[in-house]
Image: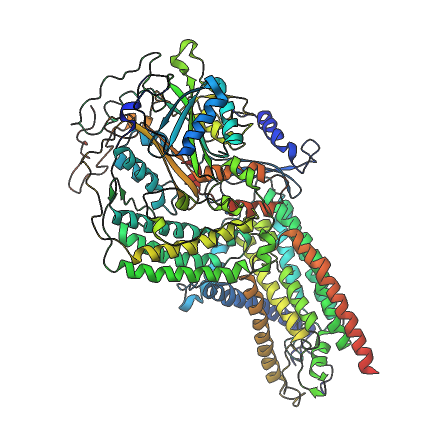
Amino acid sequence: MAPEADAAGSTATDEQAVGESPPPSPRHREIVEVLGRELGEGLLGHHYSARDAWVRVSPASWRQAGLVCRDVLGLAYLSFVSAIDWKQAPDLGGQKRWDPEAEPTEEPADGPGRWTTGVAGGGTRFQVFARLYDVVGHVGLTLKVDAGDGPDGEGGAAPRAESWVPLFRGADWHERETWEMYGVEFEGHPGLRHLYLPGQFEGFPLRKDFPLLAREVKPWPGLVNVEGLPGEDEPEEPEGSGA
Amino acid sequence: MIGPVAGTFLGIHAAYWNEAVLKLVLGFALALTGAGTFVYVYLFKMVSHLQSRLGPMEAGPHGSLQLFAEVLKFLQKEDVFPAKADRLVFGAAPFVVIMSTLLIYVVIPVGPRGVASNLDIGILYALAVSSISVIGVLMAGWASANKYSLMGGLRAAGQLIAYELPLVLAVVGVVMQAGSLNLQRIVAGQANFKLFGFQGLGLYAIPQFVGFLIFLIAAQAELTQTPFDMPIAESELVAGYMTEYTGLRFLVFFIGEFATAFALAALGAVLFLGGWWLPGMGAHWGSAAWSREVVGTAVLFAKVMLLGFVIFWVRFTLPRFREDQLQKFAWKFLIPLALANILVTGIAKVVASA
Amino acid sequence: MTATESQQRAYIAGQAAEARVNFALETEGMTLNVGPQHPATHGTLRIVVRLDGEQVVWADPIPGYMHRGYEKLCEVRDYAQVTTLINRIDWLGSFCNEVPFVLAAEELMGIEAPPRAQYIRTVLFEMGRIANLTLFLGDMAAQVGALTPVFYAFRDREYVLNLIESVTGGRFHPNFDRIGGLKDDLPKGWIDETTQVMRRIGEFCDEIDDLLIGNRIFEERCRGIGVVPRDVALEYGLSGANARASGIDWDLRRDEDSPLAWNHADWKVWTHPDGDSFARYWVRQQEVREASKIVGQLLDDLPSGPIRAKTPARIRIPRGETWMHAENPLGEMGYYVVSDGSPGGPFRCKIRTPSFSNVSIVPWLLRGVYVPDVITILASLYFILGDIDR
C-alpha cells in the first residue's frame, strides 16, 4: 500500500496522469474543484492519498489560494507554513548512511533546473508548503508552491513566495522561521528577522548545502571510548568511522 | 479586680541603666526567639506537612537546628553590592526595616509587669512605628538598581500604606471598649470585661469579631504574605525588592519579616485574645510575682502561636491578589467595614453605659 | 540581516496599532526582559516587554535559546534513531511525541501495528497526557500564587511516571515506540496498578476542584484575562486545550480516523465558550479526568496478540510524503515526513509543534495587559520550550 510510489516523484509539472488515486472523500474532491474554479490557471497539480489531499499552485496565486481556502472552503486553521529543499545533501563522507553494507544510492537526478520533487509535482529546488485545516468539517489540505532555485538558479536570487500574513496572522512566525532556515523571502511580510538564531548568524541552516558541522567534526558514531578502561592508556579508535 | 499595673520591670528593682540593658537583652531575645520559632514551626514544618512533604530533617533531630545552619550560611556569604546600586541607601534599607520591627517589641506586655515601656499611647505608638518599614522597603527597591526590585518596592509601598488604615481602624474598636491606648490597660480591660453578665471570658475577639477579622487580614497584608504578596510575587519578580540582597542583609530582611509576623501576632493576641491573661489569674494578684510573669509569657506565647498558625495557613493555601484587586479590597471593602464596626461599637458603648 | 532597534519598533508599532495603549504617545516607559531566566517562563524563553507603568505596551517573544536544530538532525538519522531525538521535544509527556512520527513511517511503509500495540500505545499516550497536564495544573496555580497544589500535582504525577518507567524503562524519555509496534509488552501486574493510579488521578482532579476552581481569588485572577476569540485562535493556529477553551469543538482523537484506539473508549470532549485563562485551566483539568477514564477503559479490554508487526531488519521507506498529526497534550502536533526512498532517514521532516503557535499569539495577546496578568496568560497558554524551539 504505497499509492504514491508510482505517481509521485516524477519531474512532471502537469496534472497527475491516469492511474492517480481517487479522492479520499467527496469533501476533498470538492476542495480541489473549487480551487480549480477560483484559481483557474493557478492550480498546477493535485494529488490524493488514501486519506489526504495535496494541491500545487502557481507562485502568482499563492496568496489567492490561501484566501480561497480560508473564506470559501472554511479551511480557517493554519497549521504551519514551511519549505522543502529538494537538493540532495552532499554525502557527508558517507555518514548520511551509517550502514557500510548498504547499496550506494543512484546518481541524483538533479542538476541545474531539474529536481526530483515530491507529490503534486514541482520544478524548483525550493518549495514552500503549508497545511490548512477545517475544524468544523475535519478535513485538511496541504498546499505547495514553487519558490525558485535559490543560489542554484540564474542570477542566484533568493527563493521567494507571497506572504500569508494578511490572511493568517499566525503565518508571521512560520514565515520568519522559513526565511531564517531556508532563505525564502516572503513578499509582504511585516518584518523578516531571525526567530531562533542569534542576530549575527550567517547562512540558512536547513538548506542542504549548509554543512552539519557536528557530523564533519565528529563522524558517526562519534567518540566511542572517551576514557580508556583501567589499565589502558589510550582511548580506542572507533571502528568504521570514515568512508 | 485587676487594676492597672505600673511599677518596676518584672518586679526587679534596679538602676535605670541596668534595667535598660536587661530590657534590651530580653527584648532582643523575645524578638529573635519569636521569629525563630515562627520560622521553624511554620515555615519549615507546618508548610511542609501541608504540602505533603517533610521539610528539613537533616540538621538536628527533625531539622530543629536548621535555623542555626541557615543563619550561619547567611553570615558567611559574600557581601554583594550591585554595581549601580546606591551603596549607602542599599546598605541601610534592611536595618531600617528591622529597626521598625524591633521598636514594636517595646510595648508588648508579656506579664503584669513585663513590658519594656508601658506607654500610655501604647497601641498608637506600635502602629506608627510599624509604618516606618515602608521607608525601608522603598529604599531597598530603589537602591537596588534593578527594574524588578523597583516594581516590587513600589507595589509594596502602595500595599503597605493602603492596609495601614484598616489595621488602625480595626484597633479603634478595641480602644473604645477598653477606654485606653495603653496595652496593659487593654489586657486589664479584657480581664474585667463582662459579656452578658459573665466575667472571665476575657476576649475582645467576641464582641469585636469584625475588628478581629479585619485586623488579621490587614496584618496579613502588612506582612506581605499571600494572598497579599504581590511585592514579593515569587514567580513574577523573583523576590521583589529583596532580589539583590545576599548574606547578612538578606538575613536581616528575613528575620525582620518573621519578627514582624510575631510582633503583629502578639499585638493581635494582646488586643483581641486577652494577651498574657488567662481566666483564673486574677485572684492572686500582687503575690508570687515571678510565677505570674512566667505563666503570662507562656500564655501569650501560646496565643501568638495560634494566630501565627492562622496567618501561615492562609499564606500557603490561597492564590495571590493582583495589585489593583488588592487595593480595591482595602479601600472599598475593609475600610468601610472597619468604620461601620467603630460606629456599632460606639453605639453599643453608649447604650450599655446608659 | 540583524534586527535593529528601529526595525523591531516598526514591526511592533504595526501590531500595536490596535492596542489599547497609544504607542506613539507613550510616556517614559520601561523595557523589561522577562527571561530567559525567570521562574514564570517554563524554560528559557525571553519576552521583551515594554511597560508603561504596570501596563504592557508591546511584547516580543524571542525563542530560540533551546533551538537544537531537530529538523536538520532528523535528516541525518535513521528512522529508528529519530525516535530517540523526538522524545525530547515535549519532555513532559514524551511518549506522545513519538507516536505521530511512527504512524507516519508506518503509513509510508504500508505496515499496520497489531491491535494490542495500538491499545497500549493509546494507553501510554494518555498517560503522557496525564503526566503533562497534572504538572500544568500545579504549575499554573504556583504562577498565580497558590504555592501548595504544585506539590500535590508532583506527588500524583510520580505515580504515573513510575508506571511509565516500569513499562518503558524511562520516566521522561521512554523511547518505546517502534515502527510496527512497541518495543516490549507490559510487565506483570501493571494493569492493576495502573487502574488504581487512575483512580487516584481522578481524586486529584477533585482536589483541584476544591482548592482552585472554586476559589474566589483564583477566579478573580483568571476570569476575563487573556481572552482569545475563536477566529483569532484559528488564525494563529491555537490547538488543543487552548482552542477548546475558545469554544472550538475540535479534538483530533475523536475527529480523525487514527489507527490508535481512542474510539474504543467512551469519553467526552470538553469545550468552554469564554476563551480566557480560567477556561484554559478548566478545560485541561477536565482533560485529565477524561484521560484517566480512557486508560481505565482501554486496559479493561486489552486485546491479546503480538506487540509488534514484522518489519524488515533495515527499515527502508519507499518514496513518498505524508502528514500525520495527533492530539498531543499541548495541542496539535504533526510530522510532515518526506522520504526519497534511500536507506537512511527522512529526506525532510517538518515538525509542527503546538507551542510554537501558542507562543506566536503572545504579542497580540499581551498588549494593554497588566504585568501580573502577563504571568497568568503565559501560564495558561502553556508552552514547553522544547516544543517551541525544537
**Relative to A75, residue B272 above or below:** below
Above or below B323: residue C8: above
* Residue B59 image offset from top left, x and y in percent: 41, 63
Q: Is residue B65 left or right of residue C60?
A: left
Residue shown at 36% from the left, 33% from the top: A24
Q: Residue C367 or C262: which is nearer the viewer?
A: C262
Q: Residue at x 69, y 31 (%)?
A: C24
- The C terminus of chain A is located in which quarter? top left
In the image, B347 versus B294, the foreground residue is B347
Q: Residue furthest top?
A: A154
**Among the 4 quarters of the image, the one containing residue B178:** bottom right
Colour convention of the picture: rainbow
Looking at the image, can residue C338 be seen? no
**In the image as oriented, which residue stretches furthest toward the bottom?**
B283
Q: Residue furthest right?
A: B354
The tally of labels here is 0
Q: Nearer the viewer, residue C62 or B55?
A: C62
Vertical position of residue C235 compared to residue C115: above or below: above
**Front position in the image: C325 or C72:** C325
Q: Does residue A148 lie above or below C326 as drawn?
A: above
At horizontal 69% and vertical 78% (from top left) the residue drawn is B187
Q: Position of residue B286 (x, y in %)?
A: 67, 87
Task: Name the spot of residue C343 as percent of width and height, x first.
Answer: 23, 28
| Position of the N terminus of chain A by quadrant | top left
Q: Position of residue C212 (x, y in %)?
A: 53, 59
Q: Can the viewer see residue B206 in this picture?
A: yes
